[in-house]
Image (tube, grey):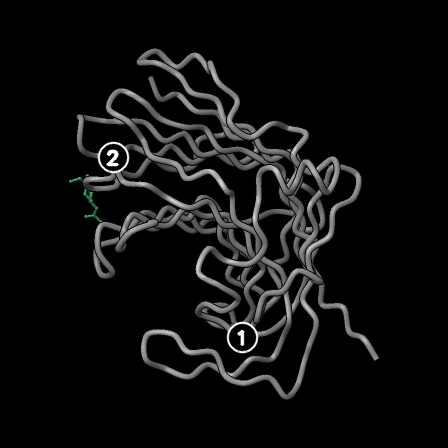
Amino acid sequence: MRFLLVSPVLMGIGFITPITAQPTASKVIIPKTCFNSQSDFDANFNYLYPWGSDHNGAARMDKAHVALSDNTLTLTAQPVKGQKDASHGGKAIPIHYLSGAVNAKQHFTVSPKGGFDFSGDFQATTTKGTWPAFWLTAVTGWPPEVDMAEWKGSGKISFNTFNTSSSVLAKDVNYPSPGNFHSIRSELRDLNGKDVQIKFYMDGSLVTTQVGKGYVGQAMYLVINLQMEGSSGSPGPTTIKNLEILSYNP
Ligand SMILES: *[C@@H]1O[C@H](CO)[C@@H](O)[C@H](O)[C@H]1NC(C)=O
């Protein structure tokens, strides 16, 4: 018996385009066609997290729970028994699901006077226990971490930027009609040669502006995953499409 808790996480398309000081997208790094076919996907993304199959929740990621169709990336979580625990921060975490995660092959480093735009259309579950996320995290050490969109099973969407584990700018707002797609956009820009300003948009409206300390020059991974439980309580679905990333780096 298969329970689909499901989540189509869909990634639509990714684009990345570099820009110079005046935001004019000039280079597509990940094209909008990135989910058109397996070869388009493989050119731009890897399966799992950059560090492997496990992280900080009850899902273990594998390739079988990532699907591509209609230029959409879908991540689906499925209950499982008999898995060995995950380990995170010195703690054992029981695994209750198999699910999907992908990470961009390209790493993202905001250059002086540069930046990136990340955008996509997401259909994300807000059911208790589901924890989908579209986020950036440090390649070396930690932070940087920018949660460009995170749904922690509360009915809200969260936008967060970390300076340290205890110094974090966090904004939670209502997430309307989770069965519909919503456009999510994050604009990262060099603020002062050291710090990066992030403007977070949902459905075309600016929700909040945050600043990451010392993020200029720090390489980041892009991760899209359907984690489960952890910060979110218990299970449900997610979908993303039209992902686009533009680089404004000179
Ligand atoms: C993080 O550091 C930046 C740059 O100094 C600052 O603007 C921001 O307010 C800090 N965040 C928090 C949560 O203190």
**Residue 19 point in image, percent of width and height:** 40, 17
Q: Are marks 1 and 2 in contact (CB under 8 Å)?
A: no
* Residue 67: image location, x then y, percent: 73, 52
Image quadrant where one finds the N terminus: bottom right
Helix or strand or loop: what does disc 1 sit on? loop
At 31% across and 13% down in the image, what residue appears?
21
Q: Earlier in the sequence, mark 1 or mark 2?
A: 1
Percent across and percent down for residue 176 are 61, 47
Q: Which residue shows up at 71% across the image and 62% down it?
A: 64
**Of 127 and 66, the residue lying toward us:** 66
**Residue at left offset 36%, top offset 31%:** 188
**Image quarter hosting the C terminus:** top left
Q: Residues within 10 Å of mark 1 (few under 14, many from 20)?
A: many
CA neighbours of label 2 inside 10 A, class few (<14), some (14 to 19), many (20+): some
Extreme-bottom residue of the structure? 82
Give the mark count. Answer: 2
Disc 1 marks a residue whose amino acid type is: Ala
Residue 144: image x %, image y %? 29, 47
Q: Would the CB of label 1 be found within 8 Å of ligand 1? A: no
Q: Quadrant of ligand 1?
A: top left
- Pick whichever, 176 or 227, lies toward us: 227
Q: Which picture quadrant has residue 22?
A: top left
- Mark 2 lies on residue: 217
Question: What distance separates the C-alpha of mark 1 from that of mark 2?
Answer: 33 Å
Out of 21 and 63, give the one closest to the viewer: 63
Residue designated by label 1: 58
| Left or right position of 22 against 59 | left
Element at badge 2? loop
Quadrant of the image occupied by residue 24: top left
For marks 1 and 2, give the one nearer the viewer. Answer: 2
